[in-house]
Amino acid sequence: MTTLTASASTSAAATEANKPSFGRLMLSEWTKIRSVRSTVWSLAILIVVTLIFTALFMQMGVANWDKSDPGQQAEMRLDPTGTILGSGILLSQLAVCVLGVMVIASEYSTGMIRASLLAVPKRVPVLLAKAAVFGLLVLAVGELTAFGSFFIGAPILGDKAPVAIGDPGVFQAVAGTGLYLSLVGLFALAVGAIIRHTAASITGVIGFVLVLTPMAALLPGKVGTYVYAYLPTQAGFMITQQQTRVGDVLGPWQGIGVLALWTAALLAVAAVLLRRRDA
């Protein structure tokens, strides 16, 4: 009996020692992401295309400055940073949403998720490691894109709407753009983990960003104003503004906090479903 007990204890200890640590899980997820060439090329193209679009939109804005409405000119002078970042942010967030879905949903379509869950039976650490690696990657890419866009767009605006990185609220807006893209990517990843189907998840996320959010802006009254303000992408987008504008319900950090809460809630739902459903 003593021998059996000792053998069982040794076996349990060996099993515990062989369990992958969270750091190893992150390394595994990083290997998966960087080994897929389409992901690497997509992020590289995202940076280049966003910078090109920013330069083109700023050039168009300056070229048509005298023809533009005085209200538009005043808005650009009031928040030139938001103008620069907003010119390419739509493209960036759509690309990040698609990548976020594919990072998790593609594993279900190929069956790779079964191998991952066999190695880590508790399941939730796999999701958390994937979210951590993807979130950090998008954060780095987002910061590179945001600062690159700013330093390209600011000189083009020149004396029309002068702005410098040291002006009040500018650094916060530029740095916050990378954080916004990272959270949007995690939001999409959570949706992909819940739906588990690539096409359906992409359709849902893009529909939410491009259709539902703009439609919410058309809701009448104060209720409509608050519903629109507290939708995740609209709330998070506030961080890209140099300063709060008249009529804004949320401030920059309040908005990014709302987006973070939406993302955390969806990740929690994804974790619960991952534990309960078959792979």
Image (cartoon, helix red, strand yellow):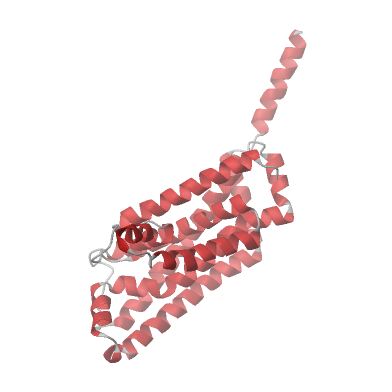
Residue 217 placement (x, y as % from top left) = 38, 66
Residue 27 placement (x, y as % from top left) = 60, 48
Report whether residue 59 is seen. Answer: yes
Of residues 213 and 265, the one nearer the viewer is 213
Quadrant of the drawing holding the N terminus: top right
Q: Count how many numbered circles sit on residues in the image.
A: 0
Residue 249 placement (x, y as % from top left) = 28, 59
Of residues 1 and 224, the one nearer the viewer is 224
Specify whether 49 is left or right of 55: right
Q: Among all residues in the image, which is located at the extreme front? A: 220
**Above or below 162: residue 42:** above
Residue 84 lies in quadrant: bottom left
Q: Among all residues in the image, which is located at the extreme top? A: 1
Of residues 153 and 241, the one nearer the viewer is 241
Which residue is found at the position 28% from the left and 68% from the top? 165
Which residue is found at the position 59% from the left and 50% from the top? 194
Specify whether 94 is left or right of 111: left
Quadrant of the drawing holding the C terminus: top right
Residue 18 lies in quadrant: top right
Of residues 275 and 128, the one nearer the viewer is 275
Which residue is found at the position 57% from the left and 40% from the top? 272
**Above or below 5: residue 149:** below
Report whether residue 23 is seen. Answer: no
Residue 268 placement (x, y as % from top left) = 52, 43
